[in-house]
Image: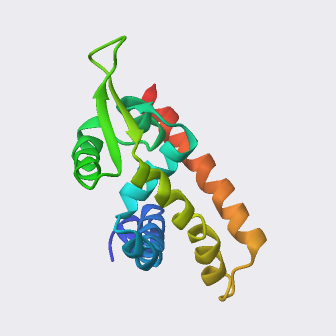
Amino acid sequence: MAYEQLKLENQICFPVYAASRLITREYQPYLDELGITYPQYLVLMVLWEHDPMPVNDIARKLILNTNTITPLLKRMQSQGIIERNRSVEDERKVIVSLTRKGKELQEKAAVIPQQLVDNLLHGPIKTEQLLELKKQLYALIDLLNRNETE
């Protein structure tokens, strides 16, 4: 090949993309039991930590655009998982809060992270390696996110 830099195996982005898709696939059986998608699970994790929260803050935390998250939140509202209401202080802001159903999902979802890690540790990767990988990925995210906000 004339352009070695264009080989898929020489790309940084492809293994990150492929790993992300494959990890999401590992989550799917657990999330199917809850009746939610992986992006909905991410929103729920944010809200379980900070409920209620403005849409813009959820989008920022998940590194998503508001036009990406809005349809997701509408679906979650139609499922009865969240509520969306205009802020009393600033009607331009939409505040997202968990419903009882959304709060109940937390208890059911609490086992998912450990189940996923247990599945991953059946292979050649050790706990320390997973933790180091997570640390490195957050450093990469910080670098790329900083470049976008500059």
> In terms of image quadrants, where is residue 149?
top left
Q: Residue at x 66, y 80 (%)?
A: 118
Q: Residue at x 33, y 77 (%)?
A: 1
47 is higher (above) or lower (below) than 108:
above
Question: Taking 140 as reference, is 40 left or right?
Answer: left
Question: Residue 100 at what x, y percent from top left?
Answer: 43, 49
Question: Residue 37 at what x, y percent from top left?
Answer: 34, 64
The furthest residue to the top? 89
Q: Which one is nearer the viewer's eye here, 53 or 108?
A: 108
Question: Taking 3 as reference, is 26 left or right?
Answer: right
17 is higher (above) or lower (below) than 122:
above
Q: How many marks?
A: 0
Question: Residue 129 at what x, y percent from top left?
Answer: 73, 70
31 is higher (above) or lower (below) than 66:
below
Q: Residue at x 60, y 70 (%)?
A: 111
The furthest residue to the right? 128
Question: Residue 9 at what x, y percent from top left?
Answer: 44, 75
Question: Taking 112 as reference, is 70 left or right?
Answer: left
Q: Which one is nearer the viewer's eye here, 26 or 93?
A: 93
42 is higher (above) or lower (below) than 17:
above
Asked whether residue 57 is in view, the answer is yes
Asked whether residue 65 is in view, the answer is no
Colour scheme of the rendered structure = rainbow
Question: Taking 21 as reference, is 74 left or right?
Answer: left
